[in-house]
Image (cartoon, rainbow, N blue to C red):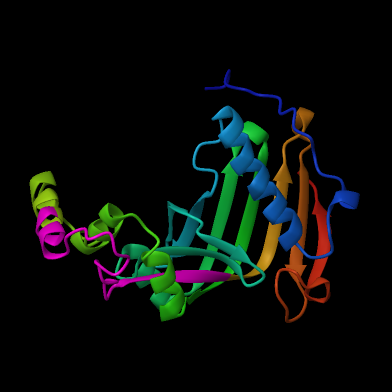
Amino acid sequence: MEHLRVDYAGDGLAEERCPAAPLEIVREWVATAVSRHAEHGDVPEPTAFAVATVDADGLPDVRTVLMRGLDERGPAFYTNTDSAKGRQLRDNPAVAATLTWAGLHRAVRFRGLAEPLAAEEVRAYFVSRPWASRIGAHASAQSHPVSDRESLERAYQECAERFPDTGSPDDVPVPADWGGYRIVVDRVELWAGRRSRLHDRIVWERVGAGGMDDPAAWRRVRLAP
């Protein structure tokens, strides 16, 4: 695979473009990825990010989920809380996540501690999902063994019959084992690909209490690529 080489020709990232706190520029980069995909279709699932946790044996585990919130408190995602990631976060809330937009030669890395979202926030997001997705949340015991595809589809059909689509956001209740997490970040890194592997890496490290929008909470540094 030695011949698979690309010399990245991204826009780079200069310090003067970086605010003292990371929220503003992270939001800008996410918005750019979303609009780029809408216009050109070459940045699929622009809010998909890889979330890494640690299991009971201290081994890393990573999977891709959709980022479904980003504010001064940090990025958020939703999942079955009895899934592998949910069980791991229950035992060890340390978490890392990465948004990667290969077509833009950009990535954002988060590191911090995951905290469960409040029930009202979970419900507000759950009722916004399409009916079929809400049924799927009931039908799937995420990360647990399933005998075959047919049994999974049978479970889905049983849940669909139990909670028929009435057009109401309340026609499917929130499953007891479904929730969400906020990553309370203590480190944020923006990576911008440049030619000759001289990439730009700008890092915000937490130095005090405060949100992702609070300059007093962060120290900004550049790292060598």
Which of 62/2 is in front? 62
Q: Does any portion of residue 55 appear in the rendered image?
A: no
Horizontal side of 77 relative to 224 (left or right) equals left
Q: Does the magenta-highlighted stretch encompass residue 178?
A: yes
Which of 47/106 is in front? 47
Residue that appears at 37% across and 66% down: 126
Q: Does any portion of residue 65 appear in the rendered image?
A: yes
Which of 68/14 is in front? 68
Give the x, y percent position of residue 199.
76, 39
Horizontal side of 59 relative to 95 (left or right) equals left
Does 16 appear above or below 96? above
Which of 223/64 is in front? 64
Horizontal side of 130 relative to 103 (left or right) equals left
Which of the 4 image quarters holds residue 2? Answer: top right
Residue that appears at 71% across and 69% down: 212
Which of the 4 image quarters holds residue 180? Answer: bottom left
Q: Residue furthest top?
A: 3
Give the x, y percent position of residue 169.
32, 65
Residue that appears at 25% across and 67% down: 172
Report the magenta residues as a range: 157-183
Does 186 appear above or below 40? below
Give the x, y percent position of residue 219.
82, 68
Which of the 4 image quarters holds residue 225? Answer: top right
